[in-house]
Image: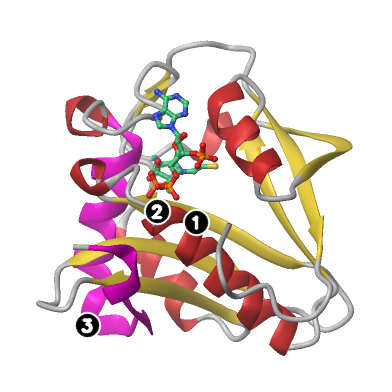
């Protein structure tokens, strides 16, 4: 499968469990080690629960974008939050560990950026754990730079688990948008 045959969509409440399974497999535990980047060495929790995913789908201004293969397999997802007069927020970015490094991630990110630009956002922001230099470098190659803001890691909000170190923190990354970003790089 090439990334050109991906179908992008917006998740509905019926897709909560499918999205949840994808996100957990990409971020945590042994399954995530099949991918090239994971949080398994930093966190031993479940990343998010079903009500958390459902809220990202149902909250006004928030959506969960999906990428599926032609036969319907969910291979990627992300959260996009649009608020008037503020940068779009991009999060919960996941590609199935066994499907990574095939350009699905960059296509889905470019799709989210195009939606944000189309909705009038002039920038996209995200938070990334500061220890994750591989993914920070990946975002830098897609045009994202640290704003200088550092946010505390929400240790008290972990889902059914614990952090594996006590020095986690979020860097805020931002990319200015200049018209449509669709196309991928
Ligand atoms: C981040 C993620 C969504 C990217 O998806 P993807 O489909 O693999 O992305 P792409 O195929 O478009 O890009 C793959 C990149 O990985 C790089 N890569 C592959 N193996 C790598 C390695 N061992 N170390 C560092 N980079 C590597 C490739 O060089 C390529 O980047 P480049 O084209 O800029 O050189 C996916 O890895 C994922 O789900 N990770 C787990 C969850 C996560 O970390 N989400 C982001 C939280 S901020």
Residue 74 quadrant: bottom left
Magenta stretch, residue numbers:
2-28
Rounded to the nearest angstrom, the CA distance separating label 1 from label 3 is 26 Å
The location of residue 120, given as percent across then percent down, is 80, 86
Question: Are circles 2 and 1 on residues that touch, CB within 8 Å?
Answer: yes
Q: Is residue 63 left or right of residue 73?
A: right
- First in residue order: circle 1 vs circle 3: 3
- Choose mark 1 or mark 3, whichever is in front: 1
Asked which secondary structure carries label 3, the reply is helix
106 and 153: which one is in front?
Answer: 106
Q: Earlier in the sequence, mark 2 or mark 3?
A: 3
> On the picture, is 2 further left or further right than 134?
left
* Image mark for residue 106: 1
SS of the residue under disc 1 = helix
For ligand 1, tell me if the residue under mark 1 lies within 8 Å: yes
* Pointer 3 residue: 14
Q: Which residue is mark 2?
A: 103
- Left or right? Give the position of 176 relative to 169: right
Q: Secondary structure at mark 2?
A: loop
Q: Position of residue 110 (x, y in %)?
A: 57, 67
Magenta run includes residue 35: no
Circle 2: is it few (<14), some (14-19), or many (20+) Cα within 10 Å? some
The N terminus: image quadrant = bottom left
The alpha-carbon separation of the residues under discs 2 and 3 comes to 27 Å
Residue at the spot 61% in from the left edge and 22% down from the top edge? 133
Label 3: how many residues lie within 10 Å, few (<14), some (14-19) or many (20+)? few
């Amino acid at each position: 499968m090439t990334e050109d045959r991906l179908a992008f969509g917006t998740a509905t409440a019926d897709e909560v469990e499918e999205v949840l399974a994808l996100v957990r497999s990409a971020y945590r535990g042994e399954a995530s080690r099949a991918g090239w980047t994971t949080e398994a060495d930093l966190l031993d929790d479940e990343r998010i629960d079903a009500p958390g995913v459902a809220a990202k789908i149902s909250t006004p201004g928030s959506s969960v974008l999906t990428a599926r293969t032609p036969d319907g397999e969910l291979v990627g997802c992300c959260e996009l939050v649009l608020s008037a007069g503020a940068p779009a927020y991009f999060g919960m970015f996941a590609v199935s560990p066994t499907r990574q490094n095939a350009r699905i991630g960059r296509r889905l990110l470019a799709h989210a950026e195009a939606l944000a630009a189309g909705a009038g956002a002039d920038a996209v922001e995200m938070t990334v754990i500061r220890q994750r230099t591989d993914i920070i470098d990946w975002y830098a190659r897609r045009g994202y730079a640290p704003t200088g803001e550092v946010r505390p890691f929400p240790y008290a909000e972990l889902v059914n688990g614990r952090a594996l170190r006590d020095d986690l923190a979020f860097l805020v990354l931002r990319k200015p948008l200049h018209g449509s970003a669709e196309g991928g790089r």
